[in-house]
Each structure stands twice: as C-alpha cells, then as structure tokens.
C-alpha cells in the first residue's frame, strides 16, 4: 500500500476538521449546477474539535477518511469539462489502514453554435500565486453573466457506509481534452497530494490538496479564474470523517483526566 494515501488522509484531518465554507461569485442566476447551491453544513462543537487535536488516521479518534473532489465547467455553447478524484482510507478492527483511489476526466460538446464565451479583453490572474496554510478559496471573475462556486463540505462522524460505498479504479491520474486542445480536464495524485485542473477558453479551475512538510502546514486550495461571459463553473470538495466509538471505560478515563486538568488550572 502506498504510504502517500495515508499521508494525505492525516493531512486532511489535521488541516480541515470542522471547517465548511463557500465562496460565491455570480452575475446571473444559474440552472446548471443547482446541486452546488444545496449546501448542507454540519456544525462541530469546540469540545469535539479539541479532542481531535493531534489525532490522525490509525490514531485514537479518526478511523476513516473519504475525500471527494469534483470540478465542472460548462461553456455557453454546451461544451463541458469535468474532473473528479476520490480517496478512501479506512481502518479495520486491527487498526490497519487500507486505501483506495478513483480518478476520472471528461470533455464533451459543444452542443450548440453560441460560442465559447471567451473574452480576449478580460483577464483574471494572481490567484494561482497565493500560498495559504490551511484552506483557501479564491474566485476571480472578469466578464458578464458568470457563475463561479467554491464549496468545501466537512461531514463529521460519517456513517460506515459512506466510507466504503462507491467504485474505485485505483488510477492515480486521468486526463481528457477536445480535438484542438482548447478545453482540458485532468486529475492526479502525486507527491503525497491531489490536484484537479480544468482549462478552457473562458478561464481555469483548480483544486489542490498538499500534505504538510517541513516548510509549511497542510494546504487545501480551491481557485476559480473566469475571463469570459456566461461561464458556469464549480469546485466541490467533500470530506467525510468517521470516529471510533468510545467504550464506557474510555469515557470514564476522559472524565477523570478532565477533572484533574480542571483541578490543576484552579
């Protein structure tokens, strides 16, 4: 089993527990990505998050991690670019971790003559040079009638089924493009990280997950750069975390520890 998968899982746990945020930029309503707007947030209490500090996969708390990445771009002529990646890491009863990965990319269309909406006089740049520890969501739009959505959803205490359902092709990369190479979609797992990229005449969309290193903490970055008109774009990240059930004896031990800590503070 590739240790890179475990590294990613731990980096996700340390970096993103309890965070769910959305950056939305639009100049007109959309009917294409209606599922993106149906955002569900699960609040996580501070006392729960406090117990997760320093706990990673195969540790005391987290027993399973599933991350799903999806980027979609639809041009006004109906051409679409889609790239997705899924990573599942679960532990068995012996606390041994196993990992599966799935990747896919596709480019279709166009389906009509309305043009790709590219605007040669518009530009959106600079966001790709931003380096933020933790989670960053950047949306840059230059044009009219565009919809761009960055979504990060964290599901804490996911059910066991959500950690094992789905098919995995264990392909660490996938890529697709149209005939002239003007629309591209790609996803890859390399160097302990995951990256998704869409390139179109109307701009680009990327998602990046990089594990912690000696130089920086772990990073999750969602970036949309739209330089055109009537583009509809979405970055979606879903993180499912499953915790190990605590026995009665473990709860008693934690209660005693908290009592001792409170006594020392007083």
Image (cartoon, helix red, strand yellow):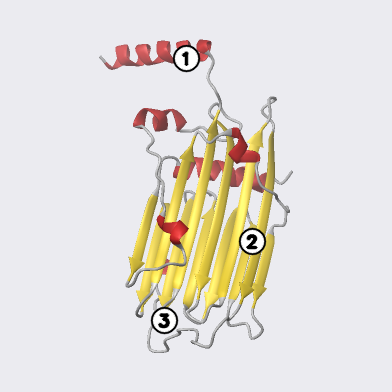
109 or 236, nearer to the observer: 109
In the drawing, what numbered circle is on residue 85?
none
In the drawing, what numbered circle is on residue 188?
2
Measure the C-alpha gap from mark 2 to mark 1.
41 Å
Residue 66's place in the image compared with 261, above or below, is below
Q: Residue at x 60, y 75 (%)?
A: 184
Residue holding disc 1: 251
Q: Earlier in the sequence, mark 3 or mark 2?
A: 2
Measure the C-alpha gap from mark 3 to mark 1.
56 Å
Tag 1, which secondary structure? helix
Q: Quadrant of residue 119?
A: bottom left
Residue holding disc 3: 228
Binning the other alpha carbons within 10 Å of mark 2 as few (below 14), some (14 to 19) or many (20 upward) gives many
Q: Residue at x 50, y 84 (%)?
A: 116
Q: Position of residue 230 (x, y in %)?
A: 41, 78
Q: Position of residue 214 (x, y in %)?
A: 52, 49
């Amino acid at each position: 089993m590739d240790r890179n998968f475990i590294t990613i899982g731990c980096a996700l746990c340390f970096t993103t527990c309890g965070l769910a945020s959305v950056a939305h930029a639009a100049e007109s309503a959309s009917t294409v990505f209606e599922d993106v707007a149906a955002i569900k947030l699960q609040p996580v209490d501070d006392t729960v998050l406090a117990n997760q500090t320093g706990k990673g996969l195969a540790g005391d708390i987290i027993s399973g991690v599933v991350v799903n990445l999806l980027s979609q771009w639809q041009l006004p002529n109906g051409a679409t670019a889609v790239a997705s990646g899924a990573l599942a890491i679960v532990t068995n009863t012996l606390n041994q971790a196993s990992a599966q990965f799935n990747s896919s990319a596709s480019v279709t269309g166009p389906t009509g003559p309305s043009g790709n909406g590219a605007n040669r006089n518009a530009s959106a740049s600079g966001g790709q040079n931003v380096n933020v520890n933790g989670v960053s969501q950047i949306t840059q739009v230059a044009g009219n009638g565009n919809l761009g959505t960055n979504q990060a959803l964290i599901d804490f205490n996911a059910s066991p089924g959500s950690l094992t359902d789905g098919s995995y092709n264990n392909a660490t990369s996938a890529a697709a493009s149209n005939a002239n190479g003007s629309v591209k979609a790609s996803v890859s797992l390399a160097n302990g990280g995951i990256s998704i990229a869409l390139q179109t005449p109307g701009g680009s969309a990327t998602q990046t997950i990089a594990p912690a290193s000696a130089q920086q903490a772990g990073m999750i970055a969602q970036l949309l750069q739209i330089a055109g008109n009537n583009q509809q774009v979405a970055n979606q990240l879903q993180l499912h975390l499953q915790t190990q059930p605590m026995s009665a004896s473990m709860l008693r031990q934690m209660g005693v520890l908290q009592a001792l800590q409170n006594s020392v503070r007083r």
